[in-house]
Image (cartoon, helix red, strand yellow):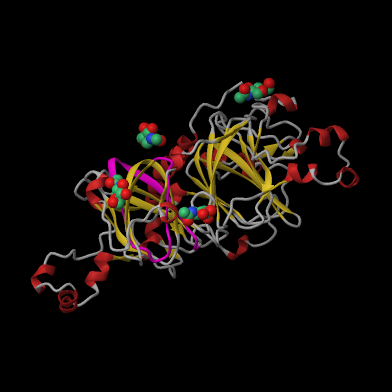
Amino acid sequence: MPTPQVPSSRGFYQALLFLALTIPAHIHALPASPRSTNQVNDESSGGTLRGSLSLQGQIPNEVDSANSAVVSPYDMAPGQDADASLGIPFTWENTDEPQPIRGSYGATDPGPQTYAYSKLNPDIVAPPISDKGSVDNPKWPMELSHNRILPDGAGWARQENTDVLPLASEMAGVDMRLAPGAYRELHWHSASEWAYVLNGSVRVQAFNENGQAFVDDVQTGDVWFFPPGVPHSLQALDQGCEFLLVFDQGDFDDSGTGMISEMFLRTPKEVLSKNFNAPLSDFDDLPTDELYIFNGTPAPKLSAQNTTGPGGVVQGNQSYTYHLSKQSAYEVPGGNIKIIDPLNFPLASMFSAALVTIEPGAMRELHWHSTSDEWGFFIAGEGRVTAYEPPSTGGTFDFQAGDVSYVPAMFSHYIENTGTEDIVFLEVLKAPEFTDISVGQWLKLTPEQIVKDTLHLPQSLLDGLSPNKQYIVQGDKNLTALAGGSGTA
Ligand SMILES: *[C@@H]1O[C@H](CO)[C@@H](O)[C@H](O)[C@H]1NC(C)=O
Ligand SMILES: *[C@@H]1O[C@H](CO)[C@@H](O)[C@H](O)[C@H]1NC(C)=O
Ligand SMILES: *[C@@H]1O[C@H](CO)[C@@H](O)[C@H](O)[C@H]1NC(C)=O
Ligand SMILES: *[C@@H]1O[C@H](CO)[C@@H](O)[C@H](O)[C@H]1NC(C)=O
């Protein structure tokens, strides 16, 4: 039986490659020169734009059975033919032409379709039959965000906000890359900014209302936070960096921030001269457009930029950075978890996050968040999530590394690792403390009689529950074998 080995990102490249190959074909299929839509008959092309009125309605014996949809033979992935009521995960990574079939449900798809999409989304194409109704789309692959690429190899930035993911009304995300020595220019904005370093290292610099300056270096796995209005800049160190920014406004637009270059451009030079007590000629070399992301002089040692203002130093509970990479993880069977919220990073007053590692087969346990929506990002691995939307709607969605997920408060959900590598997942809440309602803990701490009368569960199941939150539960790596399913050709 085939074993999935291909890293999840390859599917995206295949999808993009497919688009790259097909789009020019469509363009070539267009007429060489524009034609008037009023033109009914173009003799030079030898065809007609519109058919005759006589094609309406009943035309006896017109169906050509030779054109009937026949899809055969087709592959069923291991587990795809298992009893649909089990809803087990399966992969189409090694299936050439995936079909929307689960057990005895569904039927073949004669087309049109793009198999690269199906392969990334088996639970959307052939959903578990426990799904019902229509849950608003909770998934956005960052790679599908229109990218803003900057000159001279300085970097790029792309974003997820309500323009592309309308469900994500409370938080938005930006994925940014800075080349070695490149800056995200000095800027400020009305949203709070919480950030996680995905790769590399970066110097973080800020200044606040109390005349305090701040500078610190952070690396992969570290976090920073800027309150609204606090001006800051970022400069990539060494090999450059990529980081994720999370904002507490769903419609945040990173091209809408206040930038020092624009601020100077929008201020009369006479005023600049007066404000800074300097001759007009000092402003001759100002940038003529916003900089946003641009190359700079490599950053010196941190101590060389450590400035102490009249307000003293920013430290302790006022610090803008948190070295989460140095926090040891809380290990549980099936994975581990690091929590960062105002209890350990007080300045980030309304940002609570968990960095969760889930081993293959294991699962972030069934839970919901009672205090906030959850903005999530898949840093590595692949898995699936079912969002149950009260009262009676549920949908299952597949996620890969680089995808944003968004689950509103009160929606129960889980994250099941359906791949062959660890999932590393960031869940971010707009809340003063990281909390969840664990369904296992809820059942254990509810009087047994109530649970049994309601769900008809056996005593053995209740005995096996823990009174503690599990965060992650272990599971069989191969549920296909468990379900007795197999692949057929
Ligand atoms: C899981 O088990 C099924 C049935 O025994 C087998 O066909 C399949 O190859 C297994 N998958 C993996 C990933 O080991
Ligand atoms: C950063 O990205 C590079 C290039 O993909 C990779 O080789 C390296 O392992 C990454 N570093 C971390 C800490 O993930
Ligand atoms: C920055 O300056 C402050 C105040 O003088 C000092 O406590 C801190 O150690 C300095 N940090 C570095 C990296 O030099
Ligand atoms: C820092 O914040 C924590 C949590 O809010 C608080 O318990 C602690 O007393 C604060 N420490 C200082 C030095 O202010």
Residue lying at 39% horizontally and 56% vertically, measured from the top left: 45
Residue 299 image position (x, y, % from top left): 23, 46
Dividing the picture into quadrants, the one containing residue 357 is: top right
Dividing the picture into quadrants, the one containing residue 292 is: bottom left
Q: Is residue 414 left or right of residue 16?
A: right
Look at the image and tell me whether residue 291 can be seen: yes
What secondary structure is the magenta-colored segment mainly? strand
Q: Is residue 414 left or right of residue 375?
A: right
Residue lying at 28% horizontally and 61% vertically, measured from the top left: 309
Residue 477 among those drawn in magenta: no
Residue 354 image position (x, y, % from top left): 55, 45
Q: Camera-side residue: 50 or 400?
A: 400
Q: Is residue 25 above or below residue 278?
A: above
Q: Is residue 484 above or below residue 163?
A: above
Q: Is residue 75 above or below residue 105?
A: above
Residue lying at 38% horizontally and 51% vertically, measured from the top left: 27
Q: Is residue 55 left or right of residue 298?
A: right
Residue 323 image position (x, y, % from top left): 42, 43
Look at the image and tell me whether residue 346 can be seen: no
Residue range highlighted in magenta: 220-249
Splitting the image into four quadrants, where does ligand 2 fall? Answer: top left
The image quadrant where one finds the C terminus is top right
Q: Is residue 252 left or right of residue 74?
A: left
The image quadrant where one finds the N terminus is top right
**Number of disc labels:** 0
Residue 221 among those drawn in magenta: yes
Q: Camera-side residue: 12 or 282?
A: 282
